[in-house]
Image (spheres, rainbow, N blue to C red):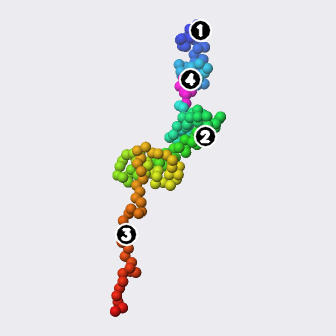
Amino acid sequence: CVSLASTASCPLARSASQLRLRLFPSSSVAEMAGRGKAIGAGAAKKATSRSSKAGLQFPVGRIARFLKAGKYAERVGAGAPVYLAAVLEYLAAEVLELAGNAARDNKKTRIVPRHIQLAVRNDEELTKLLGGATIASGGVMPNIHQHLLPKKASSSKASTVDDDDN
């Protein structure tokens, strides 16, 4: 058995080939790679982001990087960036929902800074959170002082005098 190329002429090569097929029925001899692993059988698993593991849209990895680079603490736990990303995503969704409602009330389909300003300032909790923030191109809240409004004509029976006693 000098040549391993022709398995038909050599009984040892033929029996080794049959043994491999019995041990690895799904793979052929040509697919065998080094260390006994078949090519394609141990394909690398696609990387899953921490955001998708947590079911978030905000980038957990980027927030973790910012927390580490910001020197807020000497060490940053594994759950801290996930929690912070979830909180930021919730706040963004809340502001966008209220701003979308403000845009719809104004019969617009696009959210502009004015709608964000109206949404934030009309919500008590968001006003408390973002009280010191200035929203660029947001404008001011519509407000007319009570003294400037026209007074209502009060119709009370005590002011009219009826002369029924004569």
Q: Quadrant of the C terminus?
A: bottom left
Q: Nearer the viewer, residue 66 or 161?
A: 161
Q: Out of 109 and 144, give the one closest to the viewer.
A: 144
| Number of numbered discs on residues | 4
- Residue ranking furthest to the right: 74
Q: Residues within 10 Å of mark 1 (few under 14, many from 20)?
A: few
Please name whichever residue, 114 or 13, is drawn nearer the observer in this view of the structure. 114
Q: Is residue 39 magenta?
A: yes
Residue pointed to by mark 1: 1
Q: Secondary structure at mark 2?
A: helix
Q: Horizontal and vertical percent for residue 100?
A: 41, 49
Local packing at callout 2 (Cα closer than 10 Å; few below 14, some 14-19, many 20+) is some
- Marks 4 and 3 sit apart, C-alpha to C-alpha, by 89 Å
Q: Which residues are magenta?
A: 38-45
Q: Earlier in the sequence, mark 2 or mark 1?
A: 1
Q: Which amino acid type is shown beneath numbered disc 3?
A: Lys
Quarter where residue 164 is shown: bottom left
Nearer to us: label 1 or label 3: 3
Q: Is residue 22 visible?
A: no
Residue at x 42% of width, y 62% of height: 146
Per the model, the C-alpha gap separating discs 2 and 1 is: 65 Å
Counting from the top left corner in percent of width and height, residue 124 is at 50, 55
Q: Kindly state the secondary structure of the residue where label 3 is placed.
A: loop
